[in-house]
Amino acid sequence: MFLNHIGVINKNADEAEKFYQGFLGLDKQKDHILPHELSEELFSVTGEIRLLTFGMGDQKVEVFIYPEYNSPSPNIPHMGLLVDNFQEILDKAGKNGVRVIKGSHKEKSVYFIMDFSGNMIEIKPSS
């Protein structure tokens, strides 16, 4: 078994593209509309939902565009990424208005970045 995709909600398609494609460098693979019947059956949402899919290889992030979305509190749901360019991503975050959250305990530090709708992405060095 392997992870096929992660689904997140974003308020704005432009910001989703700016973060997932522009900042993380994922390829935009799809941009389509989830029909209102399916949106209601699956997510109890009345109306169509725009769905953007970003990915690299077999790793995919489905981003559902829902302008009324407010990030849940506490914001525990997240995805984790292993990255080759860990320090470069932290440096790039500061230059692009991407929030970085660092948690430390004893000698261990954990880092999260947040997309522009408040979804949390844990990043770890791949090596």
Image: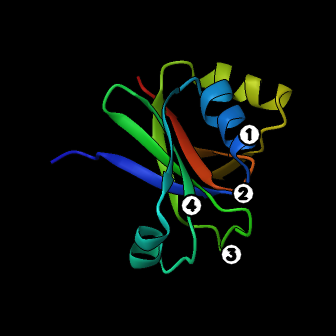
- Mark 3 vs mark 4, foreground winner is 4
Q: Earlier in the sequence, mark 3 or mark 1?
A: 1
Which residue is labeled 3 in the image? 73
Q: Nearer the viewer, residue 84 or 103?
A: 84
Residue appearing at x 85%, y 25% in the figure: 95
* Residue type, mark 2 in image: Lys
Q: What label does residue 49 carry, if any?
A: 4
Q: Do the residues labelled 2 and 1 touch (CB within 8 Å)?
A: no
Q: Is mark 4 on a helix, strand or loop?
A: strand
Q: Nearer the viewer, mark 3 or mark 1?
A: 1
In which quadrant will I find the C terminus? top left
Q: Which of pointers 3 and 2 lies earlier in the amino acid sequence?
A: 2
Asked if 26 appears above or below 66 in the picture, the reply is above
**Crowd band around label 1 with a 10 angstrom C-alpha radius: few (<14), some (14–19), many (20+):** few
Left or right: 85 as drawn, with respect to 16:
left
Query: Which residue corresponds to the image point at 29% horizontal and 45% vertical from the top-left?
Result: 4
Secondary structure category for the residue under label 1:
helix
Pointer 1 residue: 14
Q: Is residue 106 visible?
A: no
CA gap between label 2 and label 1 equals 9 Å
- Residue visible at 43% across and 72% down in the picture: 37
Along the viewing direction, whichever of 108 and 100 lies nearer the viewer: 100
Q: Distance between the residues labelled 3 and 4?
A: 23 Å
Horizontal and vertical percent for residue 111?
62, 43
Mark 2 secondary-structure assignment: loop
In the picture provided, is 125 more to the left or to the right than 97?
left
Instruction: State the mark number for residue 11.
Output: 2
Residue 89 picture location, percent across and down:
66, 25
Q: Residue 105 falls in which quadrant of the image?
A: bottom right
Number of residues whose C-alpha sits closer than 10 Å to that of mark 4, classed few (under 14), some (14–19) or many (20 or more): some
Q: Are marks 4 and 2 in contact (CB under 8 Å)?
A: no
